[in-house]
Every structure is written in structure tokens, then in C-alpha cells.
Image (cartoon, rainbow, N blue to C red):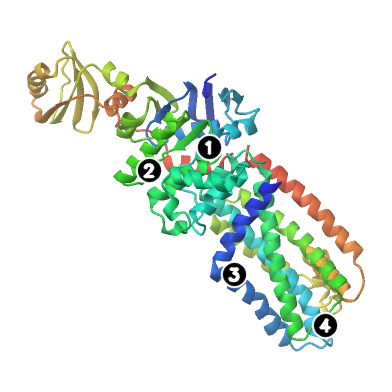
Amino acid sequence: MNAIETHDLTWYYHTLCAVDHLSLSVNNEIFGLLGPNGSGKTTTVLMLTTLLHPTEGTATVCGYDIVREGENVRRQLSYVPQEMAVDIKMTGRENVLFFAHLYGVPRAKDKTDEVLAIMELTDRADDLIRTYSGGMRRRLELAQALVHDPAVLFLDEPTIGLDVAARKKIWEHIGALRKSGMTIFVTTHYMDEANLYCDRVGIVSKGRIVALGQPSDLKSELMTDVITAKVSGPVSIPTHEGILLVGQAGDEITFTAENGKEALPYLAQALAANGAIVHSLSLREPTLDDVFLHAVGNQDEPRNFDDHQFRTMLRRRK
Amino acid sequence: MSSIWYYMERDMIKWLRGRVAVISLLIMPAAWLIFVGLALPVTFTGNYLDFITPGILVMTMLASAMAGGTLLIFDKILGFLNKFLALPSPRESILFGKILFITIRGVIQSTIILVVATLIGATILAPAQYGMIYLILVLFGLVISGLATTVALYVEDHDSYAAFNTLITMPLFFTSSALMPYSVMPPWLRAIASVNPLSFAIDAIRSVELGVVPFLQMGILAILCVVVLAVCMQVFRKMTV
């Protein structure tokens, strides 16, 4: 039995399809759901944590149906939403103990001390949250989430708004939890972080999974080298065996090539053929960003999707 | 059931640590008692303080309960509600925890009013009478906090709620029997005041002061209380699918 199993999971807001027939299996891993803002990541998490009912399709968490067995599902999971919601007028210990009580954890006080120690907050446990940094607040939320030993942990943008050091620390903690056997479902729009820390990623665009697999596999599927050209003027896209167009964003055109070094002079010549000016050409290994671009297509394509409206709509939670 | 207590405890800790909020909530009713109860030149009663105290008790409960709706709005806006809804404990306990906290806070304020009123000259009552006054206030507090939290579930932001609060509180207070007896009201006001739910609670407390047990008003309040809480729970279940 997989920790998370979804089958054609779909959610409509009026006529807008936020999540479109999503089918996934996640088990015993750090799974990253990647995609731009408004691509349906949060909606997916809200459904899996039983905060929204799917319009179509089904999903199970630890074998329990998210619609019919909501309470059992909630017993198995912890959810840390994107907004940092910790009570600033309470101390770290009080915040965690509150959750321990709500979860009905036996020996709540000892368990609270234990998770505060895991999250390296013991020294500051009796200080008001008001005095905590962003990274510490996030770690405190993780401590709240861990207090009942969940089987599955849902983290919605866990590193958003944190500095580099705090992000690294959060991911190290997530990695340690994964080693202890927890299944972790993360959403993020930071491709580089997903690349470094996720066992497997699914890239979503407009509610659909467009690429799924280990970051290294996804990158190697893009062949070996990525060439980015900065061009202005009338551009003609060259066609040549072994060179593939990935996408265009502004004046930047991205290609993949089987042999990058040989493709460079050819591209320089071909791009300039129509009178365009080639400002620079760079050659590098592919990243998840390229995987994303390749899967989603042209990133500049206007998405008529009002992100603000979408967030308000989520809050309304109809 | 225990989760209701923990939700209540959280709000209580947060409230008690906001010093300005606590102080203002204590000073407001005292100001009413002193400036209205002692200063107004009235002729229809010998001890206006005894007359006005029930009105101020009920008004304070009303204001406190209506203000309580904000708590749920902020939990909703700041992401707490989603966190709580993802917990395995019964979801309705979030709601009942709020209602319980709001009512307890109102009772604390009412106690201060009763103490201040006695200090500045209100008649001292028998323990059973105080007990009955508290019972009436709790029933009334449950009704209003139930209404306030239900509205808070629907309202999107804090500003709209504040507007709703003003819209309800002031007219409800001035059209009740809080400030004057029915006998000196103009007929149109008498008609409104006699169906105003605030008047039920105020009249009930006045009957208690006179040594009469107000079964009718208490019965009405109790029925209202059950109905409002049932509706409130249904709405909450519907909103949090």
C-alpha cells in the first residue's frame, strides 16, 4: 500500500480547472510537486489533507479514502500550510504543546520536549514566538507537525520567504525525517531546491502533471547539453540533426544538443544568418528548469490566470 | 470534547497577554456605569444604577461576543483554520472552543461590572439571584457568540466584519429596554423594544433583581441558544467540507 495514491484527482472552481485528472503514487520518499504559482499545487495538497473535496476522482492516504474516511486520513498526516501560522503571543513550547493536546498525544509534555530538541529549538523553547526568526518559526511548525509521529507530512512551500541558510536547514531536517521512514509531500516553485533534496518530482502546469520522475532521470532525458543563446533581431530557428529547440523566453533561446561543443559554432552561424545579432552563447548541463521549460513549452506564453483571484478563491474554500 | 478546552485555552492565553485589550475591556463597562448610571438625571426610578446595571451587563456581553467573531476571521485569514481543520480532533470543537472562550470572557467582564456597580451603590442581591443573572448572561452570550462566529465564517475580511458589528450592535442596544422602562418609551420604540432579543435578557435580569424567576424569558433564551448553536454547527460543517 502506498502512502499517497491519487486517481484522476480533479478540482474545478466554476469553469476553471485547477487540478486536472492527477494520478500519482507516492511512498516512502520526498516527493516534490513543482510548478509555477497557480498551477494547482496547493489545491492538490488541500484535497489530500481533506480540506477540499475533489470534484472528480479519488485519492487515498495510507489506504484511507480522503472523502469518506477524512478523520482516519487526518490521523495519519500533518500539514504545514504556506502561511506561517504560529501564535506569536505564545512561547514555542506552548505552541507545540497545544498541538500535542489536540492530537491527543500521550505524555504530551515529554513528546513536546522531544520534537523541540529534534528541531533544535530547546534553547528558545520558552521565548515568545514574537522573538523568533522566520526560519525558527518554520522549524517550530515542523515540530508541531511531528508531535504525533505522522506517517505522511504535507509541506506547502516550506522554504518560501526564508534566507539561504534557513532554507538549507529546513531541507536537512526534511531529509532526516525521510530517513526515519516518513513520506514527505512537498510543493515548491524552487526548482534548484527540488533538484537537490527531492527523491522524485512531478512538474505540474495548469493542473496537469507534465513530467514525473527522479530529477537526475528527467535531466538526462533532455540529452546531454543545454545551450542558451541571447539574440536580438529577426531570428530564424535553425533545424539541424542533434539540436533541439527547448523554448524561448524573451531574447533567450534554449536548445539541447547531443554534442554541445560541436553545436555551438553551428548555432552561432545559423542564428545570425537572418541578420540577427547573437550576443552570447552558453553551454551547460541541464537543470530542472530546462526540464520544466521543455515540458511546459514556451514560458512567455500568456497564461490568462489571475493568481490573486485564485488565492482569494482558495480562502473562500467553497 | 477536550479539544474544545484546548482551543479555548489558546484564545484565553492570547487575550490575557494583550494588555491593552484586557485593560480596555475592563475600563469600558466601568465608564458606562459611572457616566451613565450615576450622571443621568432620571425621574422614573429612585435608584437608576439598579435599573441600568442589567442593561450594561447585557450590552457588554453583546459587544464582547460580537467582537469575538474577529478571532475566527483572523484564524481564517492567517492560515490557522486550515491547520486546525487538518487535525484529527473533531472539527466542530474549533467552533465551540471559540464560542466558549467568547462567553467566558463576557462572564469575566460581567463580574467586573457587578463588582463596580455594588461599590458605587447598587443594591446587594442574594447569591441565588447572582447565580440566575449569570445563567441568563451565559445563555445570551452563547446566542450572540454563535451568531457572531457564523457570520465570521461567511465574511471574507476583517473590515467587512467590523462594519457588520457596528451595524448590529448600536441599533440593537438603543432599541432595547436597556436605558429606560417600557412605560416612558414612545409607542414606536416600545414596539421594537419588546421584540428585541436584548430586551429578553435585560428584562429577565430585572425580574431577578425584583425577586421573580423569569421562566418565560429564560425559556426563550434557552430555545434560541439551542437553535443558534445547531444552525452554527451546520453552517460550519458545510463551510469546511
Helix, strand or loop for disc 2: loop
> Which quarter shows the N terminus of chain A?
top right
Give percent across and percent down for residue B103: 71, 60
The answer to whether tags 4 and 3 share a subunit is yes
Q: CA distance from mark 3 to mark 1?
A: 34 Å
Helix, strand or loop for disc 1: strand
Q: CA distance from mark 3 to mark 2?
A: 35 Å
The answer to whether tags 1 and 4 share a subunit is no
Residue type at mark 1 is Ser
The residue depicted at 84 percent of the width and 88 percent of the height is B46
Mark 1 or mark 2: name the one nearer the start of the chain.
1
In this rendering, position of residue A140 left or right of residue B118: left
Residue underneath mark 1: A78
Above or below residue B237? Residue A230 is above
Residue underneath mark 3: B22
Question: Between residues A55 and A118, which one lies in front from this camera angle?
Answer: A118
Q: CA distance from mark 4 to mark 3?
A: 27 Å
Nearer the observer, disc 1 or disc 4? 1
Residue type at mark 3 is Val
Nearer the observer, disc 3 or disc 1? 1
Residue underneath mark 2: A160
The answer to whether tags 3 and 2 share a subunit is no
